[in-house]
Image: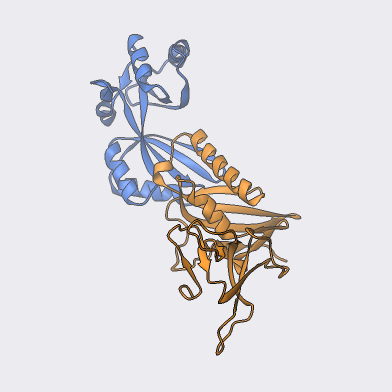
Amino acid sequence: MSGPLFTECSEQCGIHIWADKFLVEILDPETGEPVPDGESGELVITTLTKEALPLIRYRVRDLTRKLSEPCRCGRTHPRITRISGRSDDMIIVRGINVFPGQIESVLMKIPEVGNHFMIIVDRIGPLDSIKVQIEMHESAFSDKMSDMMALKKKISGALKSVLSLAVEVELVEHGSLPRSEGKSKKVIDNRKI
Amino acid sequence: MGSGIEDKIIKQISLFAENKPGRLANVANKLKSAGINIRAFTIAESGDFGIIRMVVDKSDYAHKVLHDAGFTVSETSVLGIEMEDVPGSMSRIAEVFGKAKINLDYAYAFVTRDQKALLIVRVNEIEKAVKTLEEDNIKLIGMKELEKI
């Protein structure tokens, strides 16, 4: 629906929504209530001028944030940020919402690891646990155990600061995680509820 | 590195391996089919993964074979120190390192066929270590000599 619905400008800091034609709401995926400006939520679209096939509060299930302040390019149409994931991907671990997209964006900023990862959620005793298996680049491999432990600590620290959740990090061999076309399955949930 | 130091350094093969049954067999099979002989071997483990460290007769070839087979592998410069296989040899070498304030990252040792012992060590300042050991008349084994052991 890009183009008629929204378009990026030369500033490339978000996508402008043509707000005179479309009403965009960002809602909390669980409560259905609007979230404050700038906070992440589910994209919901209503067409204002389509007559034959209107959409009324259509839940796209993509996660984004809305930015209402005017853009540097001068346009005053609101913007949405890059899609960070899907609301139906969301997992809840110890009461905290976790999106695979959040983990992916943390890992993409760490040059030692690739973007191949797998999230494994389990329940050990009464507590949920979350583990991320990550494929390491060969160039980041060190024969010194202390270097490898420091890398694990760096990754788990970066994940914790974003997710507010202690995450176990497991480094795995390059090429060992399953590959699939398109949207790959990133979560294995072993919890029995 | 200064000229000649290459003859005093051993290239160790270091390998990342997940702690799962069959991983070592995969590595060993590759070396077997490439006709590579292992001189010294050790695994450092940390729960979910291990680091395999080994000294082989043809290190560059072994590195290529394992890399091409998809393993996470690197070559590391280590020292091979020849010792008499008698009580006190290790003590003498450890003292030399201690006096020169050279820290060892890790070490392992094996006994050779000609009644000598070989101590493999990784140090941070390898050039300083080579110089110090030579001043104390301690023999270092290079790759060429290693092929003959």
Q: Quarter of the image holding residue A39?
A: bottom right
| Residue plotted at (55% across, 41% down) | A154
Q: Is residue B20 visible?
A: no
Q: Which chain identifier belongs to the orange chain?
A: A
Q: Residue furthest bottom?
A: A52
Q: Quarter of the image holding residue B64?
A: top left
Q: Position of residue B24 (x, y in %)?
A: 44, 47
B12 or B90, nearer to the observer: B12
| Residue plotted at (36% across, 24% down) | B79
Which quarter shows the N terminus of chain B?
A: top left
Position of B6 with respect to A133 (left or right) is left
Q: Which chain identifier belongs to the blue chain?
A: B
Q: Position of residue A7 (x, y in %)?
A: 47, 68
Q: Is residue A99 visible?
A: yes
A135 or B90, nearer to the observer: A135
State whether residue A115 is above or below residue A48: above
Q: Quarter of the image holding residue B46?
A: top right
State whether residue A107 is above or below residue B117: below
